[in-house]
Image: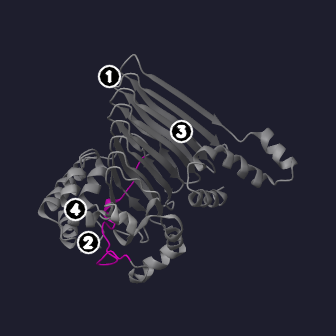
Amino acid sequence: MTNKKGLNKTIVREISKQKNEPKWMTDFRIRAYEMFEQFSNPTFGPELKIDFNEIHYFKRMSDKVSDQWDEVPKEAKETFQKLGLIEAECKYLGGIGAQYESEVVYHHMLEELVEKNVIFCDTDTALKKHPELFQKYFNHLVKYDENKYTALNGAVWSGGTFIYVPPHTKIERPLQSYFRINTKNMGQFERTIIIVDEDSELHYMEGCTAPTYTTDSLHAAVVEIYVGKNAKCRYTTIQNWSNNVYNLVTKRAIVEEGGLMEWIDGNIGSKINMKYPCCVLAGEAAKGNCISIAVAKEDQIQDAGAKMIHLAPYTTSNIISKSIAAKGGNASYRGTVRIGKKATHSKSTIKCDTIILDEFSKSDTIPKNIIENTSSILEHEATVSKIDQDKLLYLMSRGLTEEKAKELLIMGFIDRFREELPMEYAVELNALLKNYF
């Protein structure tokens, strides 16, 4: 039943039944579905023309999550092998999860992290094995009744990542999850919850891909991150969905006293991307950073940016946004910084740079900056330019082709973003962009 197109209360209940969930989760899903039915699409940003009756909301590939590649369904295993996940896990990861369609099919973590009492599993497993911890954090930072897509995620969420890092624990190697939509008209609605407790550190990485079809798919995820006192969390994403995927994601972190949250956010694929990673700086001297790129070519709209909400004194935030538009694409920055009344002596810096590669492409900078006290500082700088012709001619005079010279200039433009990536991700980004223009 749940592999059928369309959505109603019966399908929502069936998803919960197939997952063998407790009654409170089934009831939660129904409330979320009712809100989804009431909400309209967002009134800002690009127009969304999604036919919700044409989407598959749940597709199960396996009846269990395996920690052995040999036990993963053949179709999923072959896909992930081509993407290099096994090689990456062996080389530099502390743990990895792989979601194919609606559910995680593979999950593995180093034994040394188990010994440190780190929890790293899929979110469905967390609901069953860690119910008290799950309920403490689920739906507390991103509420199901915020908008149409948080409500949709609440109704049909499946898979995703659950991480708990105990106090005074530093994870030396990154943890990674990979999300793959492989079916025509498929929807993917993972729910990720990350808790980095006091004085602990985590680097989490996320990758996303899908093959191209003539009809549209939908990715509407929710991410909730809790950064404890003096803790650090870095969340790195390279999103390379195909150009038939609507990517509508809500990502939010709350940062306590002295904590640091860093979003390293790459947006390359998708038909329409609406994503604005957020830091709620709730504790004194909390810090939030977001470094992002948005790359759009023909038939693509990248409506991306960041949000920084300052609630406590001496908090700081930095947003660096790089946008590239080519071949008629639209790569725009949309962001919000609010420094509240109690966030005295705080500071925020926003820097938005855009390169437009032809006369058919477009980019807008749409900031909302609010300061509610007189002791704080907010700086915002925005630039829009084309490829520097003098630099282009200089490189060509040195024997480079025009195509190679443009490539070098673009790589230099996003250098601040690339230097924040692990080497393997930087190499992947270079390969993606070389084939992009």
Image position of 415 (left or right of 93)? right
**Chain-order first, disc 4 or disc 2:** 2
Which residue in the structure is indicated by mark 1?
341
Residue at mark 2? 2
Residue type (three-letter) at the residue carrying disc 3: Ile
Q: Amino acid at mark 2?
A: Thr
Mark 2, other Cα within 10 Å: few <14 / some 14–19 / many ≥20: some
Between the C-alphas of marks 4 and 2, the distance is: 26 Å
| Residue indicated by mark 3 | 320
User: What amino acid type should be assigned to the residue bearing mark 1?
Assistant: Lys
149 lies left or right of 173: left
What secondary structure characterizes most of the magenta part?
loop
Mark 3 vs 4, N-terminal side: 4
**Residue 116 visible in the picture:** yes
Q: Nearer the viewer, mark 1 or mark 4?
A: 4
Q: Position of residue 169 (x, y in %)?
A: 37, 53
Q: Name the residue carrying label 4.
A: 130
Taking the magenta stretch, the answer to whether it contains residue 58 is yes
Q: Which label lies toward us, 3 or 4?
A: 4
| Segment colored magenta | 47-67
